[in-house]
Image (cartoon, helix red, strand yellow):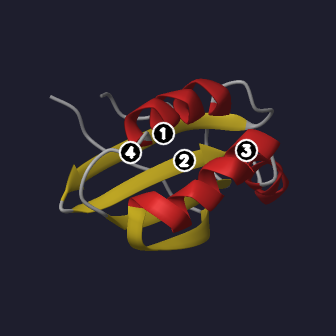
Amino acid sequence: MDFAQTPEPPYTAVIFTSLRTDGDDGYGAMSAAMAELVVQQPGYLGMEAARDGLGITVAYFRDEASARAWKNVAEHREAQRLGRERWYQGYRVRIATVTRDYGWDR
């Protein structure tokens, strides 16, 4: 996975931190479906994710309205419901406005 290609700030970051339950129980398929669906959403900019016990996914959106619209997509709402029922021991969602963005690449 590469770094998400984001524009000059400001933009919105949705930070999803999770602890999974054991097993898959359809998680992999739903995760792939959501990754395909989110790229079609107006205002979506990119995503970065890592998992080593604790999972962290950061999705970037043009603005908070775009992030809120993604939260309310019917298929995503179903994934959220199943996540609470099957896939997560717990999770946190944090919404932030990115005001600075800088980095370095070799």
The residue depicted at 58 percent of the width and 35 percent of the height is: 34
* Quarter occupied by the C terminus: top left
Q: Secondary structure at mark 4?
A: loop
Residue under numbered circle 3 = 62
Q: Residues within 10 Å of mark 3 (few under 14, many from 20)?
A: many
Q: Residues within 10 Å of mark 4 (few under 14, many from 20)?
A: few
Q: Secondary structure at mark 2?
A: strand
Give the alpha-carbon distance from disc 2 to disc 3, as whole Å: 10 Å
Nearer the observer, 69 or 89: 89
Closer to the observer: label 2 or label 3? 2
Q: Earlier in the sequence, mark 4 or mark 1?
A: 4
Q: Secondary structure at mark 3?
A: loop
Amino acid type indicated by mark 1: Met
Residue under numbered circle 2 = 59
Q: Residues within 10 Å of mark 2 (few under 14, many from 20)?
A: many
Give the alpha-carbon distance from disc 4 to disc 1, as whole Å: 24 Å
The residue depicted at 30 percent of the width and 63 percent of the height is: 21
Q: Is residue 53 above or below residue 30?
A: below
Residue under numbered circle 1 = 47
Give the alpha-carbon distance from disc 1 to disc 2, as whole Å: 4 Å
Q: Earlier in the sequence, mark 1 or mark 3?
A: 1
**Residue 105 drawn at (x, y percent):** 22, 32
Q: Residues within 10 Å of mark 1 (few under 14, many from 20)?
A: many
Q: Is residue 7 left or right of residue 89?
A: right
The residue depicted at 55 percent of the width and 70 percent of the height is: 93
